Image (cartoon, rainbow, N blue to C red):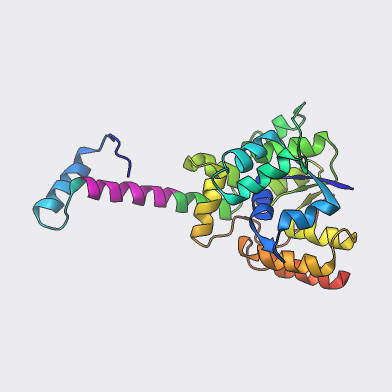
């Protein structure tokens, strides 16, 4: 099972958009284990409780489909100190390093750069969808529907690039 | 709408009173409320430019604006703005 850490942005997107009448997160979960930091849980499921995606995330956390792991040590504090990051992004980088997850899924440029420079494999959510399809953990047809559903949250070119990568898998 | 007590610079208050006196504006508190909205909008746009340029993260942006990350996500979505600051596809590192 592919173990990945999700930052708040991709988690909200995955819990908000639907493909084939199913939340994106439910397309992803059979093929991976999603782990989040407690601060990301706060941002998405606690402070996000008034939103349907916050409720969706909270339900999946409550029944264990999404795991919340505490940060036990901070290896990158000094390295990350000068970046203009929020708590969730900082903690996601620490958690990914701590649990030796396969990748950090993050849609934020600053967090992406900081995590990559910390030596972590870093994927945007559309890249992660393609990765699941490459590993046959998600069908290419479902991956395409997922990518088209989340397109509004990305800048021009990002999802189009992923769709081309997906063509190579199909 | 909530009502709060806010200190206002004298020249801004004079401007509001003058607008009312010349018939340009109605209620002074409404005018001041509009200024606050404009100030928030300006701050949002300034921070969004920094976010877009890859200088600050979404979480930092939310904190600076005084919103939760989920509230900021909703504000950006309402305005049709992407919540990802990555402009071009980046190949996975490592």
Residue drawn 73% across the image and 64% down it = A146
> Is A4 drawn above or below residue A97 in the view shown?
below
What percent of the width, then of the height, locates residue B76? 52, 55
Residue B38 covered by magenta stretch: yes
Residue drawn 74% across the image and 30% down it = A70
Q: Main secondary structure of the magenta part?
A: helix
Position of residue A138 in the picture relative to residue B8 (left or right): right
> Is B79 drawn above or below residue A74 in the view shown?
below
Q: Is residue B74 visible?
A: yes
Q: Which residues are magenta?
A: B29-43
Position of residue A75 in the picture relative to residue A110 (left or right): right
Q: Residue furthest top?
A: A72
Q: Nearer the viewer, residue B4 or A158?
A: B4
What percent of the width, then of the height, locates residue B26? 16, 53
What percent of the width, then of the height, locates residue A20? 72, 66
Place residue A50 in its image quadrant.
top right
């Amino acid at each position: 099972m592919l173990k990945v850490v999700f930052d708040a942005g991709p988690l909200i997107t995955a819990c908000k958009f639907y493909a084939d009448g199913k939340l994106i997160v439910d397309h992803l979960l059979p093929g991976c284990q999603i782990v989040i930091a407690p601060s990301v849980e706060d941002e998405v499921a606690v402070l996000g409780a008034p939103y349907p995606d916050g409720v969706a995330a909270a339900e999946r956390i409550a029944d264990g489909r999404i795991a919340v792991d505490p940060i036990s040590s901070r290896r990158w504090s000094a390295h990350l100190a000068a970046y203009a990051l929020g708590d969730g992004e900082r903690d996601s980088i620490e958690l990914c390093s701590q649990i030796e997850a396969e990748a950090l899924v993050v849609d934020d440029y600053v967090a992406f750069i900081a995590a990559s420079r910390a030596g972590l494999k870093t994927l945007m959510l559309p890249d992660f969808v393609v990765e699941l399809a490459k590993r046959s953990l998600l069908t290419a047809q479902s991956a395409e529907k997922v990518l088209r559903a989340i397109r509004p949250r990305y800048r021009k070119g990002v999802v189009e690039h992923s769709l081309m990568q997906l063509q190579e898998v199909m | 709408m909530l009502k709060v007590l806010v200190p206002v610079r004298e020249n801004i208050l004079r401007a509001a009173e003058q607008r009312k006196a010349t018939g340009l504006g109605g209620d002074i508190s409404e005018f001041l409320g509009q200024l606050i909205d404009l100030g928030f909008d300006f701050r949002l746009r300034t921070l969004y430019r920094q976010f877009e340029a890859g200088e600050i993260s979404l979480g930092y942006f939310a904190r600076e604006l005084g919103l939760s990350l989920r509230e900021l996500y909703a504000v950006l979505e309402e305005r049709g703005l992407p919540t990802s600051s990555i402009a071009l596809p980046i190949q996975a590192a490592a």
